[in-house]
Every structure is written in structure tokens, then in C-alpha cells.
Amino acid sequence: MRLNSYNSRDIIDIVNALLEDENACKTLLSIYLDTKSETTINRYYEAYENLREKGHFDPDEKAFGISWHWGSFLGGFLFFWYRKQYEMMVYSMLAMFFYFFPSFIFSGAFGYFAVLNGFCLTIAKGISKGMKQTSFEEVKERLKDKSLSDEQILLAFAYNCGKRACEKYGGTDNKPLYLAIAIIIGIIYFLNH
């Protein structure tokens, strides 16, 4: 599911407003990607900004997010599995059954798109869930800072909901790394015997 097909335009606008803040976006990316590497965070942030500038995350645009990712090209479906992008993993595996090499081209072209779209959807789902559980008045009361505008309160609430969602649904799955190591050891073993 793409962010621009999400049900509530208000939530999409809140996600976009939240992620316009570079520091908030990078912090949430760090949590979602489960990394502290500045290089990785900056690379994904730059890809996010490029896709956003092309209109990929705007519901009124019909832009399609293609950008090259070497890790996903070399890893194929294992990359998507590692990044918990299970839907794209299935597409990559299906492409591999039809044509082996084009499946890697497919993976490389949609690596950033899949991860960043999942990132935005995770934040949107977190905000949506938070809004169903808490009223705006309750949020305002909890913050108890009367000097904040309604927009600042909403963004603080959205950030907290997005952070919780990124912690819960983000991260990595290490099983594909073990599988890749086993495959490499198997290949080396069979080549030597």
C-alpha cells in the first residue's frame, strides 16, 4: 500500500509536516532502520527527500518512486526480507522465478522506494492509532505547555506516535543474513568437492 492511498488526507498531511523537519525525520529513520550509522541515515534521508520532491508522497501526484539501491540490487529478495518489507520480498521472489537477472534490477530499482514507503506508512499507522485512542484535548492536557500552538502540539503528538510505531514495526530481520552465509558456505563447499 502506498502512502498516497492511505485513507485519511489529514494523517498524510501530518506525516508530511512531521517529516519536513530534518532532525525529526532522521531520528525516526534511525529508529525505523535500527541503525546509528550517520552514513546510512543520511543516504536514506537524501533518497526520501528526492522521492518527496518528485511528488511520490503527495496523494495528488501519481509519481512512482524509482531510485537505485545497490544493497537491494545485490541482495535481491534477501534485502527486502532483512528490511522487513515482506510484500516487496514476495514480488522480488516472483520476478526471480520468471527471470533471474531482471529480478535483481527490480530489487535495485525499488529498494529505497519500498523501505521509505514502509517508513511513512508505519508513521501514518502510528498516528492513526494514536488519534483513535486519544483526543486532542487529552494530548493538550498531557503536554500542559500553554505556550505551544495547536500545530506544535499536534506535531509533538505525531512524533511520539510515529516513534512508537517505528520502534514496534521497524528494525531488521537477521534471518536472511544467516541464509546468505549458509548459501555462500554451501557454494564454497560444493566447488571444492
Image: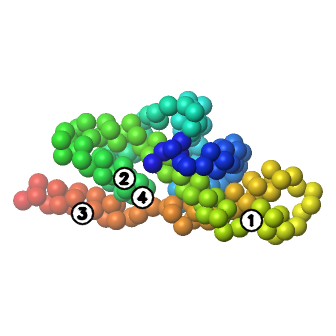
Q: Secondary structure at mark 4?
A: loop
Left or right of 150 in this view: 167: left
Q: Which residue is mark 3?
A: 182
| Residue that protrudes farthest toward the left in the picture | 193
| 3D distance between C-alphas at marks 1 and 3 | 50 Å
Q: Where, by quadrant of the figure, is residue 55 drawn?
A: top right
Q: Determine whether the residue tagged by mark 3 lies in a helix, strand or loop.
A: helix
Q: Which residue is mark 4?
A: 84
Neighbourhood count class around disc 2 (C-alpha, 10 Å): few under 14, some 14–19, many 20 upward: few
Task: From the viewer's side, name the closer residue of 130 and 90.
Answer: 130
Q: Are marks 1 and 2 in contact (CB under 8 Å)?
A: no
Vertical position of residue 91 compared to residue 46: above or below:
below
Mark 1 closeness class: few <14, some 14–19, many ≥20 residues within 10 Å:
few
Name the residue carrying label 2.
Answer: 87
Pick whichever of labels 1 and 2 is earlier in the sequence: 2
Q: Position of residue 117 (x, y in %)?
A: 50, 46
Query: Residue visible at 19% across and 39% down?
Result: 99
Q: From mark 2 to mark 3, how far is it between C-alphas? A: 24 Å
Q: Position of residue 187 (x, y in %)?
A: 16, 56
Give the residue at x 24% y 63%. 182
| Distance from Cα at disc 2 to Cα at disc 4 | 9 Å
Label 4 vs 3, first from the N-terminus: 4
- Closer to us: mark 2 or mark 4? 2
Nearer-N-terminus badge (2/3): 2
Residue that badge 1 annotates = 135
Query: As drawn, is 161 to the left or to the right of 148?
Result: left
